[in-house]
Amino acid sequence: MTKVITRAAACGLLFASLPDAGAAGFIEDSKLKLQLRNVYFNENFRDEQGLSARAAATAKSERTEWAQGFLLDYQSGFTQGTVGFGLDAMGLLGVKLDSGRGRSGTGLLPVHDDGRAADEFSSFGATAKARFAKTTLKYGTLLPKNPVLVYNDARLLPQTYEGTQIVSNDIEGLTLTGGLLDRQKLRDSSDSNGVTPDGYSGGESGDFRYFGGEYKLTKSLRLSYFNGELENFYQQHFFGVQHDLPLAGGVLTSDLRVFDSRDVGHAWKGQIDNRMYSGQLAYSHSGHTVGAGYQKLSGDAGLPFVNGATVYSFSNVGIGKFIQEDEKTWMVSYAYDFGTLGVKGLNFSTRYLSGDNGKSGAAGQAEWERDMELAYVIPDGSFKGLGVKLRNYVYRSDFSRGRDSNRIYFTYDIALW
């Protein structure tokens, strides 16, 4: 507890030392928010698929941890003038509440060489920013979220990146984004490392460059294109189309996504040549949303993505990703918003995915997953923003260990300024 208080005080001093901009917008438009995250994570393994006999003999039968996260987020306004300047800052702290050498590795906390989870871990990041008209340039700690790179925020603390990003909304209906990133911190680490692709064990890393945009052709039709390149590893093109169609008192949403990925440079030369086609239909009416989709990969190797990142795919679910070479996946989902019945803030969702024909060391392998989630956020009153989320995942595979997972999240957003 002494460590927590000391680090909290240090974060307070850092925020207090932000420069007095002497301009109304910088201070008046500033926001300071504290988010509390309390996460319990339990995962039980049900088989030893994908493990050698030697590895299976010593493999953990479960992973169970409990941790508390603190996210302090400061965002300044902009100084007045033709070009406005500002400064953002973020302090992150994770504290172990329960773990063990035989139960670590959930992704909530760093793991030491002896197999034990760290008692706590923390990081601090600052971002300088400038705005001209409707274009904003940022340099420093970033949380990129676009089809070719989505930061991971599925555990205790978010994954962060270091670099430069520019976003422009100067053309009506069009949002343009570009960036260059050279460092990252994983969601369960305080260490800053180079950017590498998932599954790569070599020592080389590269800069990640991305650019693209989304255009609202009409109120109901959106088109998007993005290009991402991880230096020396791969280049990826993304094309997307989203359309909303009023239908029988509800809305039918269609979402089509295409990824085209090729190797570049020398680290993965000749190993990546992949196309992924995804489509999903979702119909919403009176609080109910029913969805169905299909996804197919072709070419050599699976879909490449940055280590630790979230894949912009309908199939990036609780445990599996369903992006193996040549894999074909069917998806169905259902969600209900209890606000329709007068219970604001309460939501339920479930989904099922079945993939086959994947190649992960052998052809024709299959996997499936069923996820359920019940979430509630207090919408009004003194405890507005206090939320609880219950998640249950069941996963089975021909090439990876089957598992059952239960996760509980308590969150509370507190506006300090």
Image (cartoon, rainbow, N blue to C red):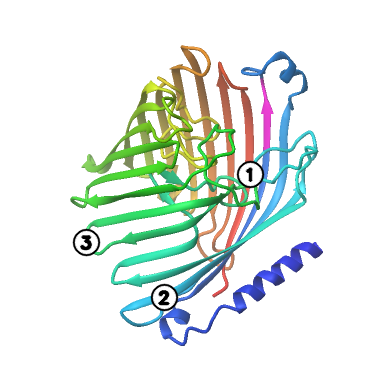
Q: Return the residue at label 2.
A: 85
* Quadrant location of the C terminus in the rendered image: bottom right
Q: CA distance from mark 1 to mark 3?
A: 43 Å
Residue 317 lies, with reference to residue 14, above or below; the image says above
Work out whether residue 349 or residue 318 is closer to the camera in this orientation and state it.
Answer: 318
Residue 372 lies, with reference to residue 181, above or below; the image says above
Q: Which mark is residue 144?
A: none
Asked if the magenta segment contains residue 43, the reply would be: yes
Residue at the (34%, 60%) spot, across then down: 167
Residue at the (32%, 45%) spot, across then down: 226
Quick one: label 2, few (<14), some, or many (20+) residues within 10 Å?
many
Q: CA distance from mark 1 to mark 2?
A: 40 Å
For the residue labelled by badge 2, is the local secondary structure a helix, a strand or a loop?
strand
First reached walking from the N terminus: tag 2 or tag 3: 2
For the residue labelled by badge 1, is the local secondary structure a helix, a strand or a loop?
strand
Say whether residue 305 is visible: yes
Rendered location of residue 220, percent (x, y): 22, 48
The span picked out in magenta is 42-46
User: Looking at the picture, which amino acid does disc 3 mark?
Assistant: Ile
Residue 344 lies, with reference to residue 356, above or below; the image says below
Lateral position of residue 116 relative to residue 250, left or right? right
Rendered location of residue 332, percent (x, y): 40, 28
For the residue labelled by badge 3, is the local secondary structure a helix, a strand or a loop?
loop
Residue at the (38%, 65%) spot, across then down: 137
Q: Return the residue at label 3.
A: 171
Q: CA distance from mark 2 to mark 3?
A: 22 Å
First reached walking from the N terminus: tag 1 or tag 3: 3
